[in-house]
């Protein structure tokens, strides 16, 4: 077994060799495999994808704030750089500055907003990336902004498809003034401050760009910095904590551009100087994967739902399959590194008689629901009231439970149940048989309409019956008469016979 120190060394080597490799990784990307007839489960995680490989929609709001748009009948396509300001205005067209240039993998092309001619109306623009399902960030977000970066900006995220938003990082040239927050370098993040949402001045510009296009970004680098400060294993340990892990999970990301870099001239009436205040984005870079709770590698249906393994289900593999709730659902774990733990859902023991079960903490395992085939019990291993097991069949056989078929007229207190092992119905006094459908020896008539449910004595005249028996037909009550005697109880001579027998060996005498 590899030591923890070796893991540290190995992961650090990987991080140093491949700085853009995802911070979060597992030894194997397999979820499960068959080994010697047994299924072996592994925590599993797909490879991180770049933005270009992920399904998302990007929207700019207000949409008309893209350079070249028409607002109230006027086309806003003029802009300037400080270099060009004194000589001429520049113009852009919507086609050249379209939002799609933010993710076209071409560093030269870029989106550009309108210039801030509308001051003092705020130049607030939201760039929203909507993913249809939860994704997890696997590395930094880098927003390349080739002209001046905003004076104020926020990166936010939503976990509910844009219904509510949570800030991830504030950016301001003056954090105190803009957001009433202390200016803090992202590299200062520690375990204690990991959940804190901070403001940094590192990625903001004070002035409009002077000179050429610049290779500069606004970055969200909490994951990388934590990885650096906690160590690659340390950060994996933190992912056991829900609040920590959720820092990096999202359905949507939103970049709020709140104030462009200006030289302060916006407050004057100099329209021309306002031409140099605007935003540009040439590239949004991030690495993410669909969020499957370490129970799946791929997303299917155009990236909208996880292809769940480990007997899990749901868009994010966030629950167990119906018949696999023998223990509570658990998220997969990165621990122990580098392989992690699958925490797969386990099948309930329902003996093939149920399609679902629910974990019950009191009994300590899953309780089967809606047992079929007349079975019952937490494991569908008993027969329902009114049924008993066919001992010649295996317990998972659909015919395992046989109906008691007790005769209602013959049971005690209308109880038509039977012994759960033998199938013996609960007969009232004087009634016998497995199903309580027979009168005891010497009685008859349980099912007769004249006196239903009663067993009457045969009352055979033993002098008139064969072998002197006092037994009669169960249904009719007919005693077995000698060939010379008659009536139900064999108490008379047949026609044409006389002198009824005086002992058992005698017959009546033929006339
Ligand atoms: Ca581009």
Image: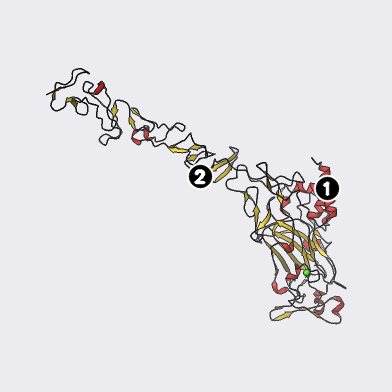
Q: Is residue 408 above or below residue 321?
A: above
Q: Residues within 10 Å of mark 2 (few under 14, many from 20)?
A: some
- Residue 31 appears anywhere in the view: yes
> Is 438 left or right of 212, judged from the image as shown?
left
What is the image's colouring?
secondary structure
- Locate the C terminus and report the quarter of the image it occupies: top left
Secondary-structure class at tag 2: loop
Question: Residue 510, how many percent across, how many down?
Answer: 14, 23
User: What residue is drawn where x is 69% and y is 81%?
Assistant: 73
Asked which quadrant contains residue 278, the reply is: bottom right
Secondary-structure class at tag 1: helix
Q: Is mark 1 within 8 Å of ligand 1?
A: no
Asked which quadrant contains residue 279, the reply is: bottom right
Q: Quadrant of ligand 1?
A: bottom right
Q: Residues within 10 Å of mark 1 (few under 14, many from 20)?
A: some
Question: Residue 326, how many percent across, how many down?
Answer: 60, 42
Q: Is residue 148 above or below residue 270?
A: above
Nearest the viewer among 92 and 125 is 92
Nearest the viewer among 227 and 76 is 227
Question: Residue 395, how many percent across, how many down?
Answer: 52, 37
Q: Is residue 378 above or below residue 12?
A: above
Q: Residue 370 — which label?
A: 2
Of callouts 2 and 1, which one flags the residue occurring earlier in the amino acid sequence? 1
Q: Which residue is mark 1?
A: 10
User: What residue is drawn where x is 14% and y is 24%?
Assistant: 497
> Is 129 left or right of 415, judged from the image as shown?
right
């Amino acid at each position: 077994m590899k030591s923890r120190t070796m893991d540290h060394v190995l992961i650090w080597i990987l991080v140093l060799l491949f700085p853009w490799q995802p911070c979060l990784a597992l030894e194997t990307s397999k979820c499960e495999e068959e080994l010697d007839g047994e299924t072996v489960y592994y925590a599993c995680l797909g490879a991180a994808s770049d933005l270009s490989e992920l399904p998302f929609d990007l929207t700019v709001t207000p949409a008309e704030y893209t350079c070249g748009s028409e607002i109230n009948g006027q086309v806003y396509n003029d802009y300037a750089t400080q270099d060009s300001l004194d000589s001429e205005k520049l113009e852009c067209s919507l086609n050249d500055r379209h939002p799609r240039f933010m993710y076209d993998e071409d560093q030269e092309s870029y989106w550009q907003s309108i210039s801030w001619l509308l001051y003092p109306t705020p130049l607030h623009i939201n760039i929203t990336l909507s993913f249809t399902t939860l994704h997890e960030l696997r590395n930094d977000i880098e927003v390349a902004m080739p002209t001046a970066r905003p004076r104020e900006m926020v990166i936010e995220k939503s976990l509910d498809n844009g219904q509510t938003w949570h800030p991830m990082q504030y950016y301001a040239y003056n954090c105190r003034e803009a957001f009433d927050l202390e200016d803090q370098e992202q590299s200062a993040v520690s375990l204690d401050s990991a959940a804190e949402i901070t403001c940094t001045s590192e990625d903001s510009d004070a002035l409009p760009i002077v000179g050429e296009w610049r290779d500069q970004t606004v970055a969200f680098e909490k994951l990388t910095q934590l990885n650096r400060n906690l160590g690659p294993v340390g950060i994996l340990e933190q992912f056991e904590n829900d609040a920590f892990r959720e820092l990096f999970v999202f359905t949507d990301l939103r970049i709020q551009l709140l104030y462009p870099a200006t030289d302060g001239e916006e407050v004057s009436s100099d329209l021309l100087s306002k031409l140099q205040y605007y935003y540009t984005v040439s590239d949004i870079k991030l690495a993410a994967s669909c969020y499957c709770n370490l129970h799946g590698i791929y997303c299917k249906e155009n990236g909208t739902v996880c292809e769940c393994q480990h007997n899990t289900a749901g868009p994010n593999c966030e629950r167990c399959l119906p018949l696999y709730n023998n223990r509570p659902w658990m998220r997969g774990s990165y621990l122990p590194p580098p392989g992690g733990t699958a925490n797969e859902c386990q099948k309930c023991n329902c003996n093939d008689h149920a399609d679902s079960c629910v974990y019950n903490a009191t009994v300590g395992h899953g309780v089967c629901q809606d047992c079929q085939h007349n079975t019952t019990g937490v494991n569908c291993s008993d027969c329902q009231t009114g049924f008993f097991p066919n001992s010649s069949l295996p317990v998972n056989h659909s015919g395992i439970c046989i109906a008691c078929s007790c005769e209602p007229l013959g049971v005690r207190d209308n109880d038509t149940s039977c012994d759960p092992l033998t199938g013996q119905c609960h007969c009232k006094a004087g009634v016998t048989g497995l199903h309580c459908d027979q009168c005891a020896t010497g009685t008859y008539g349980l099912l007769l309409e004249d006196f239903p449910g009663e067993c009457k004595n045969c009352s055979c005249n033993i002098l008139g019956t064969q072998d002197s028996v006092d037994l009669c037909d169960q249904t009719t009550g007919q005693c077995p008469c000698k060939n010379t005697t008659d009536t139900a109880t064999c108490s008379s001579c047949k026609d044409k016979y006389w002198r009824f027998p005086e002992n058992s060996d005698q017959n009546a005498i033929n006339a």
